[in-house]
Image (cartoon, grey):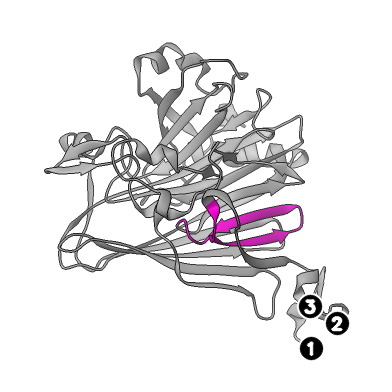
Amino acid sequence: MNDHNRTPGFDLRYTGSRQQLMRLRTFRCEGGRAQGMLACEAQSGALLLTVAADRCMDIYELMYRGVNVGFINKMGLCAPQFYDPAGAEFQYSFTAGFMSTCGLTHFGSSCTDAGQELGQHGRIGACPAEHFCVRYKNGEPGAVISGEMVQGRLFAENYRLCRTYDIRPDESFTVTDAISNDSPREQPFQLLYHVNFGYPFLSPACRLLLPSREITPRTPYSAQRLEHALDVEPACDNAADTCYYHTLGRKNGRSMAGIFNPELGFGVVYDFDAGVLDNFIQWKNPCSGEYILGMEPCNSIVTGRAEARRLGKLKFMQPYETITHSINFRFFDASELPVILKELEEYKYGGNIPSVCM
C-alpha cells in the first residue's frame, strides 16, 4: 500500500468512503435570491467552508470550531441575475461572505473613466463558474475545487480567471488564481480580494495582525481615528466607517495579514504574493447591524479607476498575458500566537528582525 494511505488520520483501510475523512459535497440552493445556485461545502476537521460556484467561486461561508468567521450581508446569498452594475447598485446583491473577488477591469468606487461608466467593485464577482470540478486528491488527504470564470464584452475585455482551492487536512487551504487577458488588446487590470470578518468571531476582543510599516487614512474621519486604526470597536448605532491603506512589509516576495480572538482562543492568518497584490486596504464598519472588518489585499487604490489612472496607479495586462498567484489561509490556536507574532515581525522587517525586537 502507498505510504500516503497510512498518514495518521488517513488510513483508507478503515474507511468505506473518503467522506469519513473530509466532507465534500455539492448542492443547489432553494428559495429566495439564492434559488438554483450551485455551491460546494468542504469540511476539514474544525474548518467548514462553502464555495459559491455561481458567484466567482467565492467563499460564501466559513466556520471554524462551529463559529462563524466571515460577514454575511443582510440579503444573504444572491444569484448572479440580481447583480446590477450601475453605480452602487452592486450593494443590493453583495453577499460579502468570507472572501469576495472584485475586478477585473475595475474595483472600488463607481466612476467614469475613459468614457465608460463603471459601477462599484466590478463584474467578476457575479460571474458563474464554468467547468466546475470537485474531487478528492489521489494518494493523499485533502480535496481540490476548481473552475473558471469569464468576464468578457464584445469589442472589449476578455478576461479568464481559473481558480483552484487546495483544501488540506490541517485546517488550512490555498486559493490559486490564474488570470488571463485572452484578447488582442491591452486591458486595465484591477483586482481586490474582499476578505471579510464578522461576528461572532469578530468582536472588540480581537487583535489585528499586520506587518504595517506605514498606515495612511483614506478619509478625514479616518485620519481623526488614526490612533485607533488597529482597534476593533464595539458595535454602535449609526457609527461611521473608516478606511486605511497599509504599507506592509515583505518576506520572500510575500506579505501577510491576520486576526486573533483571545476570547475564542484562535485566529487566522493569510499570506499572499506582494508582487501582484502590492496594496492593502483595511476597512472597518462598527455600525450596528453592519459590523464588519475587511482586510483586503489588492493591486490598486479603492477610490475608483479614474483616480487610479490620474495618479499613475492603474495597472494593465498585455494581450494574452497570464498572471498566476496564490493566497494561503491557515488557522492557529492561542498556544501558537508567539510563533505567529515572530513571523509577523519577520514580514515587517523583510526577514531581518532588529535586535531591539528580539
Q: Secondary structure at mark 1?
A: loop
Residue 284 within the segment the image draws in magenta:
no
Q: Secondary structure at mark 3?
A: loop
Q: Which mark is residue 13?
A: 2
Q: Residue at x 20, y 42 (%)?
A: 117
Residue 237 location, x and y as percent?
A: 56, 15
Dot placed on the residue nearer the N-terminal end, 2 or 1? 1
Q: Nearer the viewer, residue 346 or 120?
A: 120
Question: Which mark lies nearer to you, 2 or 1?
Answer: 2
Residue 59, above or below 158? above
| Amino acid on which the number 1 mark rests in the picture | Met
Q: From which residue to which does the magenta span run?
A: 34-55
Q: Residue at x 42, y 11 (%)?
A: 224
Question: Which mark lies nearer to you, 3 or 2?
Answer: 3
Residue found at the very far right of the displayed protein: 14
Q: Residue at x 77, y 46 (%)?
A: 65
Q: Residues within 10 Å of mark 3 (few under 14, many from 20)?
A: few
Q: Which mark is residue 1?
A: 1
Residue found at the very far front of the displayed protein: 31
Residue 120 location, x and y as percent?
A: 33, 39
- What residue does disc 3 label? 17
